[in-house]
């Protein structure tokens, strides 16, 4: 279902702003891998703790959407600073060449 909405979103973007299919696929597959990881972590933790899987999923999702995003933001800012300082043109975020 999520993949379908990614496709809808892609075709609603103006043609001159659309990413190439390969880059689009790599970006969306990151989302799928992240969702699979959270799902399997949730199943594993619910077996270990005998907790309700739905409440564990909510906790996992909230942690990922708050602390996870904060850590990613800090990491990207740090790496971007290093890339700028070292002038590594090929490692700039969001520039696919």
Image: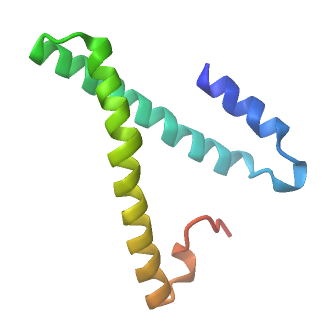
In the shown orientation, is residue 74 left or right of residue 41? Answer: right
In the shown orientation, is residue 27 left or right of residue 8? Answer: left
In the rendered image, which quarter is residue 95 located in?
bottom right
Q: Residue at x 15, y 13 (%)?
A: 47
Q: How is the image coloured?
A: rainbow
Q: Residue at x 26, y 27 (%)?
A: 41
In the rendered image, which quarter is residue 79 located in?
bottom left
Task: Say above or below: 8 vs 1.
Answer: below
Q: Residue furthest right?
A: 15
Q: Viewer-proximal residue, 72 or 20? A: 72
Q: Residue at x 58, y 39 (%)?
A: 28
Q: Residue at x 61, y 18 (%)?
A: 1
In the rendered image, which quarter is residue 71 located in?
bottom left
Q: Viewer-proximal residue, 32 or 14? A: 14
Q: Could you say where residue 58 lies in the image, as x and y percent from the top left?
A: 34, 23
In the shown orientation, is residue 6 left or right of residue 62? Answer: right
Q: Could you say where residue 65 lies in the image, as x and y percent from the top left?
A: 41, 40
Task: Say above or below: 49 vs 14.
Answer: above
Q: How many marks?
A: 0
Quadrant in which the C terminus appears: bottom right
Q: Could you say where residue 48 lies in the image, as x and y percent from the top left?
A: 10, 17
């Amino acid at each position: 279902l999520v993949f379908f909405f990614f496709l809808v979103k892609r075709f609603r973007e103006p043609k001159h702003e659309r990413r190439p299919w390969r880059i689009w696929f790599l970006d969306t597959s990151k989302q799928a891998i992240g969702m699979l990881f959270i799902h399997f972590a949730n199943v594993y933790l619910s077996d270990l703790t005998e907790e309700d899987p739905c409440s564990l999923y909510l906790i996992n999702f909230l942690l990922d959407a708050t602390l996870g995003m904060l850590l990613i933001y800090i990491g990207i800012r740090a790496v971007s600073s290093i890339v700028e300082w070292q002038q590594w043109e090929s490692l700039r975020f969001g520039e696919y060449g």
